[in-house]
Amino acid sequence: MREQVGIVGAGVSGLTCAVLFAERGYRTSIFAEESGPRITSAAAAAIWFPYDAEPAEAVIAWSLETFEVLRELSGTPGSGVSMLELRSFSRAGELKIPAWAISLGARRLSPSLTPSCFTSGFTLDVPLTDTTLYLDYLAERFRHARGEIHVGVRLDQLEEVNRDYPLLVNCTGVGARTLLPDPEVEPHRGQVVIVPKTPQSHAVVCDGPPLMYAIPRANDCVFGGTNELSADRNADPATTARIIAECSRVLNIEPPKVLGERVGLRPFRRSGICLRADQLRDGRPVIHNYGHGGSGFTVSWGCAHAVQVLARTT
Ligand SMILES: Cc1cc2nc3c(=O)[nH]c(=O)nc-3n(C[C@H](O)[C@H](O)[C@H](O)COP(=O)(O)OP(=O)(O)OC[C@H]3O[C@@H](n4cnc5c(N)ncnc54)[C@H](O)[C@@H]3O)c2cc1C
């Protein structure tokens, strides 16, 4: 009898899995230490873009599946999902357009549309999930399907979840490093700066070092970014100043005022995203779904569907 499911983690991975289970009739509860602005999912920009996650082949497959779900959601008012032009650039040489981008209609940008600090780029329309709206949208959709969210529940081991839940799904992000423990998980710290809306209506991304992006949202713009091995969740003022300077230089605008800073720990896993069925010490089955690195939103629905398949066969 598996009708009751306990999901551990209230970030984008946990919420997306929870929505699928609840809407398919499972009595589903989320247990999480934290939700809201302090978790990694709330720090993300979050644009659809495969980045800093392994293994490439599976990441692309889950990403393309997620692309279709998010594209459909962009027609749902209040979801926080919209379609946005992404311009991806390189700082040296000719940027090779990845096969996944070509399959979605990417086109090379002409030199006149390439900022002078870059050498080449491509353009593509992709989903943007405005995290200030999207995480609440998922939580509301989950509650509407009779799901329950319990925040403030810090687990030292998964077996602590009440035995009423015969199936667990582990979506603890970087928390899996200590919870399981899984030493393969590394915190790839990212800091972003929230600024008022800028004149540009498209996203600008350069994922070659130094990482740089400017992503316009409905009410503000997200400037980034950083990617370093660190678990420090505090914003660093010098990093904020550097991000503002670099984004203003690329966009050719006056440095905007800072509305806020966000820090998140991308749950990178050296041997790749962990999405597999396992057994707890008390015999209960658990499905792991963590380690999505810098692509948690980009792969969210593809991974959640894969979790569903495992739940039916475990
Ligand atoms: C600056 C930045 C920008 C990013 N931009 C993008 C982007 O543009 N596109 C994209 O796709 N991705 C992006 N990412 C990556 C994305 O944010 C992550 O991959 C994603 O948020 C991971 O989600 P998650 O639900 O797996 O983990 P989290 O959001 O970290 O959630 C983990 C949950 O598990 C809970 N938890 C952990 N340990 C325990 C425990 N022991 N007991 C109980 N609960 C526990 C936490 O409290 C939390 O609720 C970005 C990340 C950063 C930092």
Image (cartoon, rainbow, N blue to C red):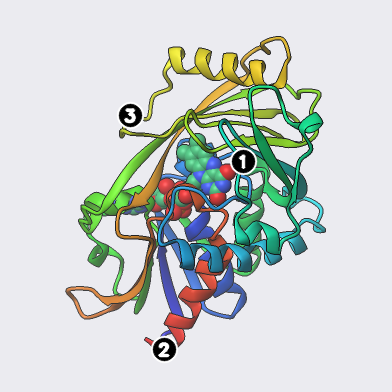
Classify mark 3: helix, strand or loop. loop
Q: What amino acid type should be assigned to the residue bearing mark 1?
A: Glu
- Residue 175 % position (x, y): 31, 49
Asked whether, in this view, residue 296 is left or right of residue 135, the answer is left
- Residue 232 % position (x, y): 33, 29
> Is there any visible trace of residue 3 in the rendered image?
no
Q: Nearer the viewer, residue 139 or 209?
A: 209
Q: Quadrant of residue 233?
A: top left
Instruction: Tell me the CA gap for discs 3 and 2.
Output: 39 Å
Q: Residues within 10 Å of mark 2 (few under 14, many from 20)?
A: few
From the viewer's perspective, is the residue at label 1 or at label 3 nearer? 1
User: Image height check: is 16 above or below 124?
Assistant: below
- Please, which residue is most extreme toward the top here? 254
Q: In which quarter of the image is the C terminus?
A: bottom left
Residue 94 disc label: 1
Q: What amino acid type should be assigned to the residue bearing mark 2?
A: Thr
Q: Earlier in the sequence, mark 1 or mark 3?
A: 1
User: Is the shortest distance between ligand 1 and the CB of mark 1 under 8 Å?
Assistant: no
Q: Name the residue under label 3.
A: 232
Classify mark 2: helix, strand or loop. helix
- Residue found at x 62% / y 61%: 100
- Residue found at x 60% / y 55%: 98
Q: What amino acid type should be assigned to the residue bearing mark 3?
A: Asp
Q: Earlier in the sequence, mark 1 or mark 2?
A: 1
- Residue found at x 54% / y 60%: 299
Q: Name the residue under label 2.
A: 313
Asked whether, in this view, residue 43 is left or right of residue 292, the answer is right
- Residue 94 % position (x, y): 61, 40
